[in-house]
Image (cartoon, rainbow, N blue to C red):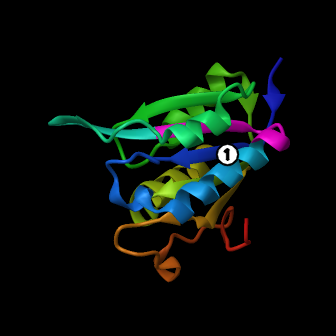
Amino acid sequence: MTLARDTLVVVDMQPDLPASREPWLRQAVRKLIEKARADNMAVVVLEYLTYEPLRTYGSTYEELMAAARGMPHFSGRAKADIDGSARVADALQAMDITSQRFLVCGVNTHACIEATAVGLTNLFPQSVVEVYANACNDFRGNDWSKFARKANLTVTFASL
């Protein structure tokens, strides 16, 4: 039986990605994971790697994985593209979950966050995709005026 759940998508919170190193960001992402646990949401953690040359950027911070560990609807996926939406879809299918609402956080805002959020709107056109601005970072800075605009994509500036 397929379950309907909101889904938290944690993008590239790996120590070898400089934007992920900010303590405020790790705390904000951890708070979102704790909220997801309290609200019985699904959680998908994406990790970026490259193939040419083969390079990983470290494993997702242990403090974040510890917050998610043991959740009934949790999955981790590696991705080799800035758009992780297909990997999120794979994870949801494996967990037998449908999602009408995605919450997105992590790094880098103007690369992997934006590409994944837009990809989710395309793969799940009936869904709502919310990017949590206060739980995103980019090594170039966050310029939200340049972030993609779509009918089912919002940037939320709510405090966590």
In the displayed structure, 54 sits above or below 117; it is above
In the displayed structure, 26 sits above or below 85; it is below
Q: Secondary structure at mark 1?
A: strand
Residue tagged 1: 8
Q: Quadrant of residue 139?
A: bottom left
Residue 144 appears at what percent x and percent y?
52, 78
Q: Which residues are magenta?
A: 37-46
Q: Give the left or right position of residue 74, taking residue 17 as reference.
A: right
Residue 100 seen in the current view: no
Q: Quadrant of residue 138?
A: bottom left
Q: How many marks?
A: 1
Q: Type of residue at label 1? A: Leu
Query: Which residue is more in the foreground, 121 or 143?
Result: 143
Residue found farthest to the bottom: 145
Q: Give the left or right position of residue 35, taking residue 111 as reference.
A: right
Q: Give the left or right position of residue 33, taking residue 20 as reference.
A: right
Query: Which residue is more in the foreground, 90 or 53?
Result: 53
Query: Which residue is more in the foreground, 54 or 65?
Result: 65
